Amino acid sequence: MSKLELTDAVARADGYSHAVVSFVGADGYPVSVAGEFSTDPGRASLDIGPLATEVLPAAGAEVCITFSHIRPQSGIGYDERRYVNLWGPAEPDGDHLRVTAVRATGWDEADIPFFEYAERSVPAAHEYMEEVGDQRPHLSKWWTFFLATRLPFLTATIVPVALGGAVAARDGAFAWGWWLLALVAACAVHLGLNIANDIFDDASGADSANVTPTPFSGGSRVIQYGLVSRRGMVRACVAFYAVAVAIGLFLAAERGWWLLAIGAVGVVLSLVYTAPPFRLVHRGLGEPVTALGFGPVMTLGAYYVCAQQWSWEAVYISLPVALLIALVLYVNQIPDRAGDEAVGKRTLIVRWPESRVITAYELMAGSAFVLIALGPPLGITPWWTLLGLLTAPMALKVVRGLRASYGQPYALMPVMQTNIGLHLFTGLLLVVGYLIDVLVG
């Protein structure tokens, strides 16, 4: 809720069709009544009526006058949301009510998008929650866990681990039990990484400076919203990494000590991504770190757990997935660029102009599909992996969306969703390609 200058608020009221007058009646119950109105912006006053005289407030009683508009959009939700609230003493005059505003608030979605408006209201929400005290609402443990860990992003781990298992299956070396343990370890590292990113972004001020978060960017926000304490996040982060290390040591002892090297690289990359003093994402190196960790490291690790040997094929087929997951990070950073720049987080999105950002996306996405296309004729991957090319139109859709909505964080949300789907469905089609080859081979 934003405060408005009184004359500005009254002038804005002219854009609405009717006013709703609310006050506490003589019997102590709230009363609301709608009516036509006229305004006098110069005096910050309004005249509402005609109204039924029996519902008029007593002279001098405080009333709230609300003007609001919202347009339902089938299948989408709502847009054109805006409102103005004015408060002042009642001055009944026959069947009319005159009010001279003494304070006013309002919001217009055309000026501040809904998500940004909600984000800017967080400090006021914290003040309210402090007043409420023990009566404050709480999320369930499940939803708190879901938000804090950003659980849906585990697709970034599931795809490369599944791909490593698929390559092992083609080589006749797939082992369900060992592969599942590798998947659990990889997921634990990923969840620990997600939480670590929130901890370090909170410490650097990046999340607090970001007033345009989306469901796909800006972190989990659980610290900013007071849902989980910093100490609680640290404990969860340590727990996930402990699980990953314990499983990793067991796998290394049972399946081969080279897994220690692969696992160590994965853990180190996850920590130096945002942890000081390295903070590689602040130096514009977030994309290559993400590509390496969620591409060759995870795919090769899953393959080695099953087959107990190295595979250049596993490395090669992980490269398209690596490029596409790097592009998920890349695009998701676009809505964060103002907040990142404010705290010195110099991502590629902050460093580069819009035209270069989009060109780089085209080159990286194009390279991913070229790698998929070259694998079979070069004799590296099975022909069925060409199924991965079916998602190329999704990449073109992302490019068109970037060009149309680059500077509009919330208009970019469908683009970010498509980009995440591009990585997921391309990776799954590559896995399907390997499985078909196993079945028909």
Image (cartoon, helix red, strand yellow):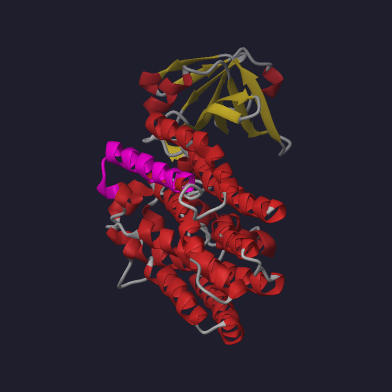
**Residue at 57% of width from left, 69% of height from top?**
302
What secondary structure is the magenta-colored segment mainly? helix
The correct choice, above or below, for 77 with respect to 379 in the image is above
Whether residue 404 is visible = yes
Residue 355 is inside the magenta segment: yes
**Residue 384, image x, y percentages:** 60, 46
Instruction: Quadrant for the C terminus, please.
Output: bottom right
- Residue 131 or 248: which is nearer the viewer? 248
Side of 99 relative to 171 (left or right)? left
User: Is 271 within the magenta?
Assistant: no
Lateral position of residue 153 relative to residue 27, left or right: left
Whether residue 114 is visible to the viewer of this picture, yes or no, is no
Q: How many marks?
A: 0
Locate residue 279: give its quadrant.
Answer: bottom left
**Percent coordinates x, y for residue 48 in the rendering:** 56, 17
Q: Is residue 402 above or below residue 303?
A: above
- The magenta stretch spans which residues? 350-373
Please state which of residues 168 and 177 is positioned toward the viewer in this rendering: 168
- Picture coordinates of residue 287 (x, y %)? 37, 56
Q: Position of residue 3 (x, y in %)?
A: 42, 38
In front: 48, or 114? Answer: 114
Residue furthest out toward the bottom: 253
The residue closer to the viewer here, 79 or 76, is 76
Residue name at image x 28 percent, y 55 percent? 346
